[in-house]
Image (tube, grey):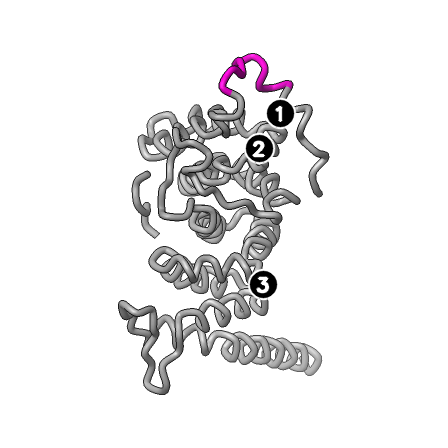
Amino acid sequence: VIQGKTSHNHHHHHHKKNYDKWNDIVKPLHLILSKADFTLDGMLLFDGPPITSTDSITIIVNIMKEARSCAILEIRALNILNQLMDHHEHLRNQALCLGIQSLLFNLMLDFPHNELLLSKSLFTTMLLLRPYGGLEGCLFNSNQMNAIKSSALCNNGIKIVLDTMKNNINSRRIQYMGCWALVNIALESEHKKILIKYDAISIVCDVMDKHCEDAKVQFRALFAMINLVTSGDFQHQPQLQHDQHPQRLNDNIGEGGGEGEGRSV
């Protein structure tokens, strides 16, 4: 009995330390979430001195690095991060510079079946890769798309995104956000080559088969498919035949490395 009490007290002390740790980490995030008033000039107003939105991005990214083992905190951080990036282009650029992409892909590996966290991470990936100027979709000349290239995606991120979709094929939420992320990932030519290498077209087909009665998933999947099968450069290779695409892609692929619904396209 004495040993049992000692063990119980030890566990209670351990949980108290963890609670204090997360409480300290989340304080600045809670401040941003609960007391911030978003203004047109991109400032966040608090009870104390004003903090710029740029500072908030740094705070959020640092919190996400500290809270890697706490899914709830990561979800809260992604909620406010997505809101900031969706309304301010310069904040999205800062998040890219701070390496948020690698954090997202690590979260997908750490929580492979957490539907809410995975869907939030995929939505953030979509926002990060949205073409400059907000032009999502397809059928643009490569010079018009202003696609964003991500080294984290080229290394291992694309495979992680596709594995996340394959391993959660029954989740309508993950497939919807996954296909939406693929829409923007496939706009960049190097990304597209890696997507083809890892059989993204078959994965999207599987998504469409599995969720054949979900119009919203079908909508995102169709746009992802269009961007996957559309040539990335219409000007430089106007004579390229359809049956030449697989060979051209295979020859150029390297080995690689190991909310709501949002707005419509």
Mark 3 or 2: in front is: 2
Pointer 3 or 2: first along the chain: 3
The answer to the question of whether label 3 and label 2 lie on touching residues, with beta carbons closer than 8 A, is no
In terms of secondary structure, where does tag 2 sit? helix
Q: CA distance from mark 1 to mark 3?
A: 36 Å
In this picture, is 111 found above or below 242?
A: below
The answer to the question of whether label 2 and label 1 lie on touching residues, with beta carbons closer than 8 A, is no
Q: Residue furthest front?
A: 236
Q: Residue furthest bottom?
A: 48
Q: Which residues are magenta?
A: 238-247
**Residue under label 3:** 68
In this picture, is 52 found above or below 223?
A: below
The C terminus, quarter of image: top left
**Residue under label 2:** 195
Question: The disc labelled 2 sits on which kind of residue?
Answer: Leu
- Whether residue 175 is visible here, answered yes or no, is no
Magenta residues, dominant SS class:
helix
Q: CA distance from mark 3 to mark 2?
A: 27 Å
